[in-house]
Image: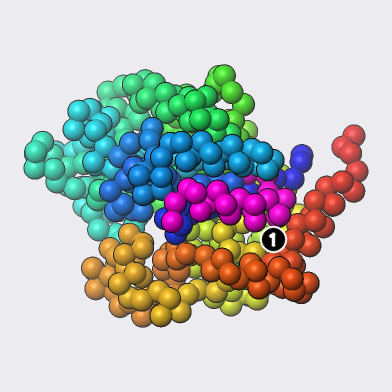
Amino acid sequence: MAKTLVYQLYPRSWQGLAEMEDFLYQIAELDVDYVWLSPLYPSPGYDHGYDISDYQDIDPRFGSMHDFDCFVETAHNLGMGVLMDLVLNHTSTKHEWFNYHPEYYCWSKTDRPGWRNLFNGDSAWQYYEQDGEYYLHLFHEEQADLNWFPEGSDGDINQELVKRFREIIDFWTLDHLVDGFRLDIPQSINKDFARDTLEIKNLLYGDKAAKVLNAVFGGGSKDLFLMMECVCSSPADGLVDYYTRNTPVDFVLDVSLKDKAGYADEVDFFDLVKEAAAEPHFMLDLESHDSPRLPSRGIDPADGIWCMFNSGAEAICLYQGQELGLTNPTEEQLPDHKLVDLDAQTKMRFRQGALLQDLRPLSRSNARVPLPLDEYEKQDPNPSSYLNLTKDWIARWRDSEDSEEPEE
């Protein structure tokens, strides 16, 4: 299997698509195969773009659809594909579907105390006065869960939603030449309404997510690159194999693995990474928009780079600025009000009474500040810089592919 390198851009830390397009030349120097864009869709921003109000447009804060097409064209000219972020589990409550197609969502006549949302542990059911019922939100209360398997359907998938998402996929891939998608936590679809409680462990396995992925992406007219965010209980739990064997997904990212970085013995953590990387369809990422910077978790940047590219992973995802060895921003760079405003989880937990000093080290806001672009100019001429160390390890990683013996 050919090695695959993905680079994630978090648009809300940029001034717009034009600035990100200029940065593509810097990304290309890392020999990247795909650029993944976190959501660019119109959104009220309660969860910073993951609460989508329109899947078939560009939020004006980033530019126009023409600007997006120019970004894709430049990426393609530089030899890189473009991946959009696609959320299948929920939409914003400001999406027109919520008012015009309430049957697309999960409703209950009563609150269900055993069901807690995954952001701060409060109720996962929000009362909607207009309808006199509660809608389900596994995450922020402004993100209503879609009802892929309506009650009484005997396990049959909601074909209206399948049709809607196929139209969305065709819009981006056929009309705007997107090459694939990063799928935002599809395991959330595995919820079982017969249970009295909702726990993350009950979402990991199940055929519902696989059925949705097959229905939405199966039999498409275009060969798409798909990588799926996943919560794994352990590197050897079989989830990577399950989803890549039974769905069109090419690679699985384990969102829980990077959470262990810096919180266990360093040798033990590398062993965990190697164990996960032994699965050829596993994509290794140790930083993202959902995590603090790796060096601020006690791992030296050079060790982090070595850990990734010497792990044996066939596929790796770098987060913007990771190649610079960036640490979490200082309080001056990320003052308290921004710490709260840049991350829905941090804001929800702060409103519950958590102290900012306790929230700061682990807040997702740490990875959402603008990149210090001048740092590239400082590090580029220095042969021993983290930037050049990363380039060197990428080249070695690529060379190891060429030196591998062919399978019999």
The question of residue 128 being in magenta is answered with: no
Q: Position of residue 96 (x, y in %)?
A: 24, 33
Q: Position of residue 166 (x, y in %)?
A: 44, 24
> Looking at this view, is 164 or 204 the one in front?
164
Residue 238 vs residue 65: left or right? right
Which residue does the image show at 32% across and 45% down from the upper left?
A: 43
Residue 45 vs residue 169: left or right? left
Q: Position of residue 256 (x, y in %)?
A: 52, 57
> Looking at this view, is 373 or 129 the one in front?
373
Residue 129: quarter of image: top left
Above or below, 147 against 318 in this view is above
Q: Is residue 64 visible?
A: yes
Q: Which residue is mark 1?
A: 308
Above or below, 110 against 214 in this view is below
Which residue does the image show at 75% across and 67% down from the upper left?
A: 389
Magenta segment, principal secondary structure? helix
* Residue type, numbered disc 1: Met
The question of residue 16 being in magenta is answered with: yes
Which residue does the image show at 18% across and 33% down from the upper left?
A: 99
Q: Position of residue 392 (x, y in %)?
A: 79, 62
Residue 83 vs residue 265: left or right? left
> Looking at this view, is 49 or 65 the one in front?
65
Q: Quadrant of the N terminus?
A: top right
Q: Secondary structure at mark 1?
A: helix
Mark 1 crowd level (few <14, some 14–19, many ≥20, 10 Å Cα): many
Which residue does the image show at 34% across and 21% down from the upper left?
A: 160
Residue 190: quarter of image: top left
Q: Which residues are magenta?
A: 15-34
Numbered-mark total: 1
Above or below, 378 against 275 in this view is below
Coloured how?
A: rainbow
> Looking at this view, is 253 or 11 the one in front?
11
